[in-house]
Image (cartoon, grey):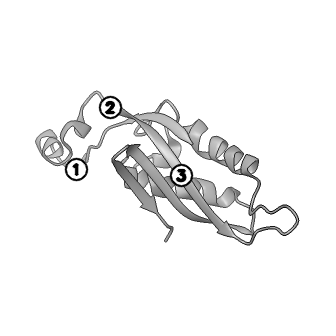
Amino acid sequence: MHFNAAHKLYNPKWDEEKNIEVFGKCANTNWHGHNYELIVTLKGEVNEDTGFLIDAKLVCKILDEQVCEKLDHKNLNLDVEFMKDTMSSTENLAIAIWNQITPHLPPNVKLHRVKLFETPRICAEYYGN
């Protein structure tokens, strides 16, 4: 799945100088954006009758409704309820996405990994608690 979102990395406990020292351009007052790529890995027993763990259409529906619709073309710091009061790093966003997906999976399907690319060279992988 893909989505585009803006954010800035900024710790309100620090002054602007410290934020720029730690986060560099990512602390830009006017925000910056990324074209995120999301890869989700599921695990469980394959259904003998269908040959599926889960129908791919259902996975796409869950990801679209619970993640992409809530993140696409949004400001992660201001517009996304499940990111409220959370530093909008790729790592924290991957954890938040995990928490958005998990309650919507059928009982026989477990989330194994959320891999989130912020750029082609920067990504975070989360495997749950």
| Residue 66 screen position, x and y as percent | 63, 46
18 horizontally vs 84: left or right:
left
Residue type, label 1 = Lys
116 horizontally vs 68: left or right:
left
| Residue 11 screen position, x and y as percent | 25, 48
Numbered circle sitting on residue 39: 3
Tag 3 near tag 1, CB within 8 Å: no
21 horizontally vs 74: left or right:
left
The residue to which callout 2 is attached is 32
Tag 2 near tag 3, CB within 8 Å: no
State the separation of the CA atoms marked 3 and 1. 33 Å
Q: How crowded is mark 1: few (under 14 residues within 10 Å), some or many (20 or more)?
A: few
Residue type, label 2 = His
Q: Residues within 10 Å of mark 3 (few under 14, many from 20)?
A: few
Q: Is residue 86 visible?
A: no
Q: Is residue 121 visible?
A: yes
Residue sitting at 17 percent across and 49 percent down? 22
The residue to which callout 1 is attached is 13
State the separation of the CA atoms marked 2 and 3. 22 Å
